[in-house]
Amino acid sequence: MGRSQQTAWEEALVASGLPVAGLDGPRGRPRFAAAAPLGASIPGEAELLDVWLTERLPRWRVRVALQATLPPGHSLVDVYDVWLGEAPLPGRVAASVYRAVLGLVREAIPEPAVGRADDASRIRLAAAALLAEPTLPRKRPKGETTVAYDLRPFIEAIEVEAVDDGEALMVRATLRHDPERGVGRPDELLAALSEQAGVTFDVRVLVRERLVLAAPPVPAETVPRPRGPRPSQPRTRPGA
């Protein structure tokens, strides 16, 4: 989440009137956390956000309060009551699902020309070839230099279908997140797919459809906990 988005959400949570944790602290900043960063140029359709409250409220009250103060360009999909002991969202994101709508630059398609009805098959074959590779060595700019990396571990799945009566293609890709190696980037996947297919893409739409969360770990055994007062700080999770 960029600085401007961070500020917009802070203002929205303060204006909501909800008992958000952190507002009573010395800095008076609401406690919340986005599940995974998203570039400013890529919109998200089902982003997740953790918000901590100092008291338990009905979901409908949280929904009504947030809907009235959401940052511009946002809409509220749903609100979930989350157990306070559940792992925070950023640590549970396993992958992102992106959807791209592509046009093919016809002049860039080598002879013999591929008919539009065959465009989807051509890109499907390229996607299957990428998935069949054990490694996909690539380079990307980093500051004033370039770094070498392997794209293959980040690619979970690629789906291709024709849309707009065959005038465009839709590519849906599931790209993994790795706590040590980073995250799969959709622009890198599309570049590799373009090179594999030998065509040039005109990217008309690129959005992150949703996040894939890893299942919470199952405890090996139940350990009795000592009884005593527990701090009450419920957490709510809006899906925006």
Image (cartoon, rainbow, N blue to C red):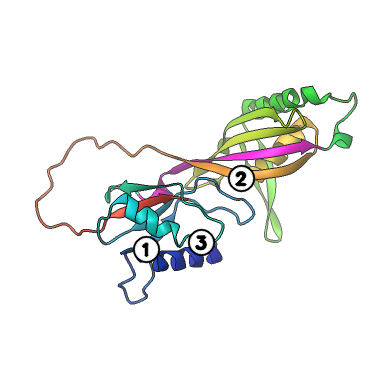
Give how far across and how far down residue 135 sits, in percent: 63, 33
User: Going by the image, does 52 lie left or right of 196?
Assistant: left
Mark before the other along the chain sequence, 2 or 1: 1
The residue wearing badge 3 is: 71
Residue range (magenta):
88-104
Element type at mark 1 = loop
- Say whether marks 1 and 3 touch (CB < 8 Å): no
Give how far across and how far down residue 46 sits, in percent: 50, 45
Q: Amino acid at mark 1?
A: Arg
Viewer-nearest residue: 70 or 86: 70
The residue wearing badge 2 is: 207
Which residue is most to the left? 227
Q: Is residue 216 above or below residue 30?
A: above
Q: Residue at (80%, 32%) from the top-left corner?
A: 198
Give how far across and how far down residue 174 sits, in percent: 56, 36
Quarter location, residue 187: top right
Q: Amino acid at mark 2?
A: Val
Q: Residues within 10 Å of mark 3 (few under 14, many from 20)?
A: some
- Measure how far apart labels 2 and 3 are at the Cα level: 19 Å
Which residue is most to the bottom? 26
The residue wearing badge 1 is: 31
User: Going by the image, does 98 lie left or right of 94?
Assistant: right
Give the main secondary structure, helix, strand or loop, of the magenta stretch. Answer: strand
